[in-house]
Image (spheres, helix red, strand yellow):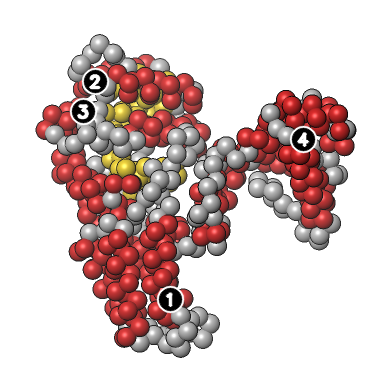
Amino acid sequence: MFQNLSEKLESAFKNLKGEARINELNIANTVKDIRRALLDADVNFKIAKEFTDKVKDKAVGAKVLNAISPGQLMVKIVQDELTELMGGQEAVFEIEGRPAVILIAGLQGSGKTTFTGKLANYLKTKKGKSPLVVAADIYRPAAIDQLTVLAEQIGVSVYSERDNKDAVAIALNAIKEAKATNKNVVIIDTAGRLAIDEVMMNEVANIKAAVNPSEILFVVDSMTGQDAVNTAKAFNDRLDFTGVVLTKLDGDTRGGAALSIKYTVDKPIKFVSSGEKMETLDVFYPERMAQRILGMGDITTLVEKAQAQFDEVEAKKLEKKIRKNQFDFQDFLDQLQQIKKMGNLKDLMGMIPGVGKAVKDIDIKDDAFKGIEAMISSMTPHERANPDSLTPSRRARIAKGAGKDLTEVNAFMKQFEQMKQMMKMMNNMPMGGRFPGMKR
């Protein structure tokens, strides 16, 4: 995420490396490189200049404390300004009305329909709501099919009228259906186009006027940079939307949209999305995003993701097994499944301070655990619960069942045993080992 921007900002701060204090000359060089990094990230020139002018004003004459270096001070100033540029603090997400109505808008291909499913899943699992998703795209039958599939995956209801070509009527009928079936949130997925046109704008504006939504979310493909910001402005002039959603953050994101959109339309970014999994939707926190852009990681979000997936009761059972040195292959498989639900593996590793840079050139696929899962799945229940029972003949059978070489199975067995030994050592420490979800 924003890897190129992060590297160029890091390079800019090197102007201050080894400096005893901040002066106008090294500030000027650093600020020039920061501005160039922002422009390369497709940030509007006016925004980039205003941003760096603020950084320069704060840096000139700033006192460097003994505890920090000039470089650290400049990073702190840039972090504060990035946070402010992206909104300053978490935006409020309004869910008001009986039912609450949320209108989703954006260009075709921006990820609207996928986001609609993710938002429904978020409201159901995190907020305890009972959502109804509405297929109001009357032009693209595939959009109705896609939303239906997503709704089935997450266990929510979907409303559609395939033969009705009146999007406003579909939206109004969906609200009636929600009231009749006790659904307390209605999420309307509207039609998109490859480019802005008057028909599209009129249609979504008419839906807004008819349903009076508590939230209008504009979905932006974060890989499109400044073009996304220009599109957002055109939509906002007609819709006066309440917030922005940045999608596809796991792609080749330059950063221009995230850094420019709040300044341009004066509307907050409320959610960020990456990947296709329904769980990969996060509330947008400007300070955390600024930290990630500056290579500081985002350990807070990582912990929150872990806590959301690890059940406290199950975590205590697991802790008890680990203390008794009874951790087995089934426990290991269960933990892998929980980790996979947290999102893209490379993205998760990037949240750990210092790790993002180390793995930037490493291809970490979401199916990285596929071979291990195949090996464990090829074991009998008895073998999973009793790792010591795996004789050479059983290992050969497991290798055949998983489509692996015997050497791969043996290597995994060795790694598993080493992991158990490490867990045992952790338990012998005064504080003991801890897993996500465990409390003291």
Marked residue nearer the N-terminal end (4 or 3) = 3
Give the Cα distance between marks 1 and 2: 54 Å
- SS class, disc 4: helix
Residue 406 is marked as 4
User: Observer-nearest residue: 271 or 393?
Assistant: 393
In the rendered image, is residue 309 in sight? Answer: no
Residue 207 is marked as 3
Q: Nearer the viewer, mark 4 or mark 3?
A: 4
Marked residue nearer the N-terminal end (2 or 4) = 2
Residue 292 vertical placement versus 411 (above, below): below
Residue 138 is marked as 2
- SS class, disc 2: loop
Give the Cα distance between marks 2 and 3: 13 Å
Rendered location of residue 399, percent (x, y): 75, 30
Residue sitting at 50 percent across and 63 percent down? 296
Give the Cα distance between marks 1 and 4: 49 Å
User: Marks 4 and 1: in contact by CB < 8 Å?
Assistant: no
Q: Which residue is mark 1?
A: 14
- SS class, disc 3: helix
Query: Please, what is the three-letter code of the amino acid marked with disc 2?
Result: Ile
Residue sitting at 82 percent across and 50 percent down? 421
- SS class, disc 1: helix
